[in-house]
Amino acid sequence: MILVTGGAGFIGANFVLDWLGQTDEPVVNLDALTYAGNRENLASLAGDARHVFVHGDICDRALLDRLLAEHHPRAIVHFAAESHVDRSIHGPAAFVRTNVEGTFTLLEAARAYWLGLDSDAKAGFRFLHVSTDEVYGSLGPTDPAFTETKGFEPNSPYSASKAASDHLVRAWHHTYGLPVVTTNCSNNYGPYQFPEKLIPLMIANALAGKPLPVYGDGQNVRDWLYVGDHCAAIREVLARGRAGETYNVGGWNEKPNLDIVHTVCTLLDELRPDPAGPHARLITYVADRPGHDRRYAIDARKIERELGWRPVETFESGIRKTIAWYLDHQDWVAHVQSGAYREWVDRNYGQR
Ligand code: NAD
Ligand code: TDX
């Protein structure tokens, strides 16, 4: 049994689906179902006894203690977070609460539980903290990619809150010996990503004939990783990662935002031509994001060297799969955008 937090969100849901596709080891999935958490993502697991969904908050210590005592997980995989940089600029409080206080509460509950395990279970236990490359700060055009030893220089409320959580996780290992591992991953894309993030927003807007908002000059660079590759990396780190270590996870795929948007437009022109003209006509430059980090790049050699993980998808294969998924799941996008997914969940599960 493993305990997953945030498993109704984008990466967490992909991870749970992937996990239960590969093994019969059950998952307890704790998720607060914020705007970003959607049980519809897990609809294919309805009636599957290997998946126990719990609607609850990682800041709720009593609930955490109860779940750990009841289910005896051998590991915790911690995805739950507020994850969108733009939202963190407009409302940072939720980011400090969930990402910092929530991770702290989960660490404390995990520590108390872990202390009560027998020595074998104690040695095998893992607290896997899922984090981001944004904690490392922003790179200049010729700077080397982030390695695991790069100092933290977070610039947004989101990245500062994630950096704080990474520091807490590190300290719980150093001070208390809790067997933690942290992954710092680059930008994910793929099925079930909320259409507030660059790639799904561009797909949804292009299909709706709406403007495609590009921040600033569109030359900010991100490294992109297909979500299935991230899930595989997490599985490897959980299985064989060394306690107390961090592992950078990336796609070896740096691209300026404008290139990403043009690729989405070109693929949509091929797969779903718009009689009104090429989708790129919708590209609209808008005001830049305040404090917008210029470039992120991940050096993912450590995870390859130690654990043999490398991404399987190229950007070309991953983005094709992603666009095909969004074309096939336009109802999902409509539900998410209208908030109707909450009604769907109420209808199917009786509660959120
Ligand atoms: P998401 O916003 O899609 O999902 C977050 C999930 O956490 C949602 O289901 C939400 O309901 C849940 N949640 C939020 N607050 C909670 C709380 N207090 N208690 C319990 N559940 C709560 O995020 P995502 O993109 O899937 O990211 C998952 C994790 O991966 C985050 O920790 C994020 O920082 C990290 N990460 C994301 C990316 C990316 O590109 N999306 C890249 C690297 C790392
Ligand atoms: O409408 C947009 N226009 C635009 O130009 C949006 C939503 C974004 N952008 C730019 C901003 C970024 O440079 O595209 C880039 C990607 O933006 P997001 O999709 O918001 O991702 P980012 O800010 O890079 O953060 C993401 O990757 C790291 C996730 O949201 C984080 O959770 C993860 O840690």
Image (cartoon, rainbow, N blue to C red):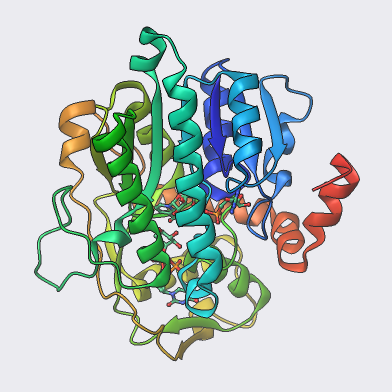
Residue drawn at 17 percent across, 37 percent down: 302
Q: How many marks?
A: 0
Between 50 and 175, the one lying in front of the other is 175
Q: Position of residue 97 (x, y in %)?
A: 53, 60
Q: Position of residue 156 (x, y in %)?
A: 37, 72
Between 156 and 298, the one lying in front of the other is 156
Q: Quadrant of residue 236?
A: top left
Q: Position of residue 229 (x, y in %)?
A: 39, 39
Between 83 and 228, the one lying in front of the other is 83
- Say if 67 sits above or below 343 in the image: above
Q: Is residue 321 visible?
A: no
- Give the quadrant of the N terminus: top right
- Say if 244 sits above or below 40 in the image: above
- Say if 221 sits above or below 17 in the image: below
Q: Is residue 192 left or right of residue 183?
A: right
Q: Position of residue 292 (x, y in %)?
A: 34, 79
- Say if 285 sits above or below 343 in the image: below
Residue drawn at 77 percent across, 64 percent down: 339
Q: Is residue 240 left or right of residue 131?
A: left
Q: Is residue 162 visible?
A: yes
Residue drawn at 69 percent across, 60 percent down: 333
Q: Quadrant of residue 58?
A: top right
Residue drawn at 37 percent across, 8 percent down: 120
